[in-house]
Structures are given as C-alpha cells and as structure tokens.
Amino acid sequence: PNQVYYVKHRAHNERGPSTWSETTLGIATRSRPPERPDPPVRVDTLTRPHEVVIRWTHPESYNIPVVHYKVRSSLTEDMQDPVEVTIGDRPVHEPGLQLGELMEYDEREGPQLSPTSGHKRFARGGKLALTQMKVKGLRPSTTYYFQVQACNQIGASEWSTSSLPMKMGSCAPAKCPK
C-alpha cells in the first residue's frame, strides 16, 4: 500500500534479449490509513487515585506519517458512553505549544477535556504524533478502559481493542483533592 512502482520491460527469444523499454509513468498501489494500533498500556507503576499515564506504539502507516491520534476512555470494556480526545496534529515549531489533551472529571458534568503539556512527543515530517498521555481528574477506586486510533492524511485506522482494565487508587475522603 501507498507505494509507486516504475516498470521497464524487454522481450527474450532464441536470438537474445531486446533493449529495455522506457520507464513507465508509475503505477500507484492503493493508499490506506494506518493499521489498527495495539491497545494502550499503563505506564505508571504507582496507582494514583485521580490520574493515569498511558502509552501506545505507532502502528504500520505505509510510509505516510501518523499526524494525530484519538484516545477514548470508558467505564466499560465495550466503550459505552466514551470520552474522546484528539491529540497531536500541530506544527513542532509552534510557540507556546500545548501537547495533547487530558480528561478532567467534574462530578456535575462528567469527564472534561482540557490542554496540558509535558507529554512525550514524536515528531515526523514537521507534525506531532503523540504516543503517551497523562489522564487526570479520574474517580478514585474506579476502573477505566482506553482505546486509541491512528490518523494519517489518508484516513483513520480502526480503534484498537480496549486496554486492560486500569483501576485508580483509593484515598481517604478527607484527603481527596477536589
């Protein structure tokens, strides 16, 4: 996929080969979006009550760079009522760059999205394709599942399968920050 091939040909008979033909204009194979990524994994070994750091690997993208990812989270493995966010797809040289997004939880409104910095960045072709993010504002003692989707200029991959369950740590009610 996503390749252009140039061809020359010549004939052979009992008297020998002919001369080579001119090179063709090029034959392009069908363009495709990236392959389905592997599910995200938990990075931090310390279980915190309100946040988790997840990462994933770049899937095969057939020589077309992944320009951004979408990450979604749900309380169920089948991703019912997910919260979704797009990360990446910004020029590397942009002043005051805010890398990625994070999910904030508000008890009245549920998970919220807001910018953050300090995420690992992976630069390709002048764009960011983030492969790690910190998710904050999560509920203590709650289990979350995550999925990731890769996007390039051709389109979006299928969503990864759901991550393994990621349970947040617990804390005493008097010590939980708001």
Image (cartoon, rainbow, N blue to C red):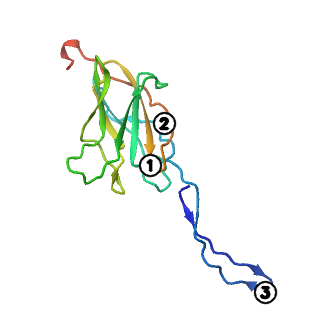
Q: Quadrant of residue 106?
A: top left
- Asked whether disc 2 touches disc 1, contact meaning CB atoms under 8 Å apart, the reply is no
Disc number lying in front (2 or 1): 1
Q: In the depicted view, which residue is nearer to us: 16 or 44?
A: 16
Residues packed near mark 2 inside 10 Å, few (<14), some (14 to 19) or many (20 plus): some
Sooner in the amino-acid sequence: mark 2 or mark 3 = 3
Q: Residue at x 62, y 78 (%)?
A: 22
Q: Which residue is mark 1?
A: 152
Question: What is the residue that sits farthest to the bottom in this orientation?
Answer: 15
Q: Quadrant of residue 43?
A: top left
Q: Which mark is residue 15?
A: 3
Label 3: element kind: loop
Sooner in the amino-acid sequence: mark 2 or mark 1 = 1
Quarter holding the N terminus? bottom right
- Asked whether disc 2 touches disc 3, contact meaning CB atoms under 8 Å apart, the reply is no
Q: Is residue 171 above or below residue 60?
A: above
Question: What is the residue that sits farthest to the front in this orientation?
Answer: 25
Q: Which residue is mark 2?
A: 159
Q: Is residue 173 above or below residue 123?
A: above
| Left or right: where 66 falls relative to 24 | left
Q: Position of residue 178 (x, y in %)?
A: 20, 19
Q: Position of residue 140 (x, y in %)?
A: 30, 19
Residues packed near mark 3 inside 10 Å, few (<14), some (14 to 19) or many (20 plus): few
Label 2: element kind: loop
Label 1: element kind: loop
* Tag 1: amino acid: Asn
Q: In the depicted view, which residue is nearer to us: 16 or 149?
A: 149
Sooner in the amino-acid sequence: mark 3 or mark 1 = 3
Question: What is the residue that sits farthest to the top in this orientation?
Answer: 173
Residues packed near mark 1 inside 10 Å, few (<14), some (14 to 19) or many (20 plus): many
Disc number lying in front (3 or 1): 1
